[in-house]
């Protein structure tokens, strides 16, 4: 059955959280949906979840620490900032697969590690549609995107910004049509 009305959650240790295969949804009208503040060796898996921001929730999934974050078979929509914000203070890995991100006011996925940290991220079969932007990767990000779509954003589809440190963004078998700006953009600041 459908489970709804679950409020925001904070994950502080290694865990696997899964919906029941049909739909599990968190309705968030104020703060962040899921905040990950796990230990440096912890792996966090979020599976089969539907997280809705109702237009006023801030961020769908916000990762501040942990060794690995896996977001698989999820739908994240309607947040006033990003759908997924990967901003760890230490280095880590992130995997987003078979996930849809729609109607998030700032963007679908934002990868921006702390000043001396690095994030290795993989997006596989991710649909980013109707957000302000698709993927934005900043200083210290190493992101590989495969089989994914960034479409109909008000600004750019895929963005790599290297203001202080290098960014490595690799796109394969992916498309980026129908944006207010560019399909793929790189530089020191976003136009």
Image: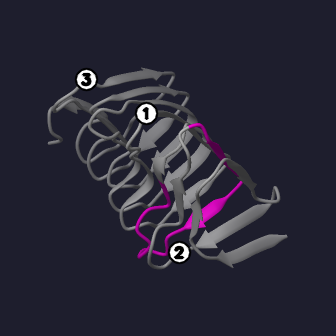
Question: In the image, which is nearer the foreground, mark 1 or mark 3?
Answer: 1
Q: Nearer the viewer, residue 65 or 4?
A: 65
Measure the C-alpha gap from mark 1 to mark 2.
28 Å
User: In the displayed structure, would residue 54 be above or below residue 131?
Assistant: below
Residue 61 x/y as whole percent: 51, 56
**Badge 3 is on which residue?**
166
Residue 33, position in %: x, y? 53, 66
Q: Which residue is mark 1?
A: 91
Q: Earlier in the sequence, mark 1 or mark 2?
A: 2
- Tell me which label, 2 or 3, sits earlier in the chain: 2
Callout 3: SS? loop
- Going 67% across and 68% down the picture, which residue do you hit? 25
Q: Secondary structure at mark 1?
A: loop
**Number of dots carrying numbers:** 3
Please tell me whether mark 2 or mark 3 is closer to you in this view: 3
Q: Is residue 46 magenta?
A: yes
Q: Residues within 10 Å of mark 3 (few under 14, many from 20)?
A: some
Marks 1/3: CA–CA distance: 15 Å
Residue 124: x and y, percent?
A: 58, 32
User: Residue 111's x, y, as percent?
Assistant: 38, 41
Q: Which residues are magenta?
A: 41-62
Label 2: which residue? Answer: 28
What residue appears at the point 30 percent right and 25 percent down from the top-left corner?
A: 167
Specify how the rendered protein is coloured.
Answer: one colour
Q: Quadrant of residue 56?
A: bottom left
How many residues crowd mark 2 within 10 Å: few (<14), some (14–19), many (20+)?
A: many
Disc 1: CA contacts within 10 A as few (<14), some (14-19) or many (>=20): many
């Amino acid at each position: 059955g459908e489970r709804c009305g679950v409020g925001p959650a904070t994950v502080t240790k290694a865990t696997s959280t899964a919906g029941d295969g049909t739909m599990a949804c968190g309705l968030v009208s104020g703060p962040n949906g899921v905040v990950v503040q796990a230990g440096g060796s912890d792996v966090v898996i979020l599976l089969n979840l539907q997280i809705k921001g109702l237009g006023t929730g801030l961020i769908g999934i916000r990762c501040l620490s942990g060794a690995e974050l896996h977001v698989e078979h999820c739908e994240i929509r309607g947040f006033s900032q990003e759908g997924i914000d990967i901003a760890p203070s230490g280095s880590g890995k992130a995997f987003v697969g078979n996930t849809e991100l729609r109607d998030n006011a700032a963007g679908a996925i934002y990868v921006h590690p702390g000043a001396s940290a690095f994030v290795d991220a993989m997006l596989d079969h991710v649909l980013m549609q109707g957000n302000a932007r698709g993927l934005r990767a900043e200083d210290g990000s190493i992101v590989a995107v495969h089989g994914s779509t960034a479409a109909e954003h008000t600004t750019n589809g895929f963005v790599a910004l290297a203001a202080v440190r290098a960014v490595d963004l690799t796109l394969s078998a992916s498309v980026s049509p129908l944006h207010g700006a560019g399909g793929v953009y790189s530089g020191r600041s976003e136009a």
